[in-house]
């Protein structure tokens, strides 16, 4: 493939990327506006205008064969069922919620334990936290799309993929992706604050996004190396 033909195809890819990123940017902005409108509605409506009651359940299946134990007998099952399931000792915590054991029964390979949480009532104000989470997510999405679009614009008009402009845009895109390493844990924990009634921010690291950032940065330095080789080749000629 000739050099000129390859550059034209690269430019065409940049054009397609600009179109796609523009459409994505429009949808992201619409989503952001929707979240902002929702926030205004939450602020205007009375606190108890709408309430939502949630109840969680859990089924725990213990496979005693897989756990290295022996099959539980019918007598042992009955002894378990005779326990006062409302007693504090028959409760457990999971995902910051307390579950009370409501039923114990035999299972094909062990025992099945059913439990449920107490009712959680939420009002409109509790939905503020999921909206804050969504707002943060949409803002980061718009920022990322902006850098992708900027890179596509540079590719659309570049005379070489190893140009300084392309390399700079790739680096900026990589840096713009760094917040995504933490954003998932932050937004999930903020949204979960609606159920706990208190602000809870967890800085969990998304290993998948760490790899994406490293790959994009590696591409930037690979292109930088290609630019050096191209410059040396041009000087030789």
Image (spheres, rainbow, N blue to C red):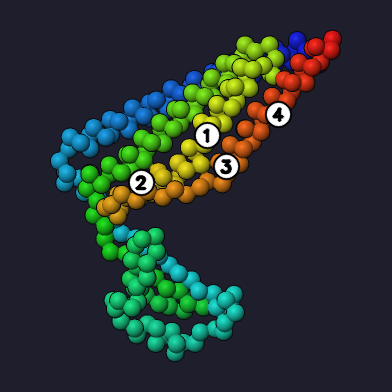
Question: Which residue matches tag 4?
Answer: 222
Label drawn at residue 210: 3
What x and y, as percent, mark residue 43?
Answer: 20, 36
- Measured in 3D between alpha carbons, the distance from the residue under mark 2 to the one under mark 4, in whole angstroms, is 38 Å
Give the residue at x 37% y 82%.
81
Residue marked by disc 1 = 177
Residue at image point 69% right, 24% down: 224
> What number is the disc on residue 190?
2
Mark 3: few/some/many CA within 10 Å (<14, 14-19, 20+): some
Disc 3 to disc 4, C-alpha distance = 18 Å
Residue 50 showing in the rendered view: yes
Marks 1 and 2, the one that precedes in the sequence:
1
Distance between the alpha carbons at the discs numbered 1 and 3: 9 Å
> Which corner quadrant of the image does residue 102 belong to?
bottom left
Of labels 4 and 1, the one closer to you? 4
User: Between residues 166 and 4, which one lies in front from this camera angle?
Assistant: 166
The x and y percentages for residue 41 are 22, 34
Q: Nearer the viewer, mark 3 or mark 2?
A: 3
For the residues carrying marks 1 and 2, which lies nearer the camera in this image?
1
Which callout, 3 or 4, points at the residue further toward the start of the chain? 3
How packed is label 1: few (under 14 Cα within 10 Å), some, or many (20 or more)? Answer: many
């Amino acid at each position: 493939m000739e050099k000129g033909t390859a550059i034209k195809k690269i430019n065409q890819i940049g054009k397609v990327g600009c179109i796609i990123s523009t459409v994505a940017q429009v949808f992201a902005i619409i989503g952001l506006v929707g979240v902002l409108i929702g926030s205004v509605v939450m602020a205007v409506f009375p606190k108890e205008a709408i309430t939502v009651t949630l109840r969680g359940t859990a089924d725990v299946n213990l496979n005693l064969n897989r756990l290295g134990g022996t099959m539980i007998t019918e007598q042992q099952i009955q002894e378990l069922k005779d326990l006062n399931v409302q007693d504090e000792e028959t409760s457990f915590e999971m995902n910051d919620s307390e579950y009370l054991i409501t039923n114990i029964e035999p299972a094909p390979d062990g025992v099945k334990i059913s439990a449920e949480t107490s009712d959680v009532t939420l009002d409109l104000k509790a939905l503020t936290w999921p909206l804050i989470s969504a707002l943060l997510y949409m803002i980061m999405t718009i920022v990322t799309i902006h850098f992708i679009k900027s890179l596509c614009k540079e590719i659309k008009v570049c005379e070489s993929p190893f140009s300084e402009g392309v390399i700079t845009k790739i680096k900026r895109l990589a840096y713009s992706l760094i917040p995504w390493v933490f954003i998932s844990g932050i937004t999930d924990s903020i949204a979960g604050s609606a159920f706990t009634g208190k602000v809870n921010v967890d800085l969990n690291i998304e290993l998948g996004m760490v790899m994406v950032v490293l790959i994009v940065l590696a591409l930037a330095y690979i292109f930088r190396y290609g630019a050096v080789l191209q410059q040396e080749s041009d000087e030789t000629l």
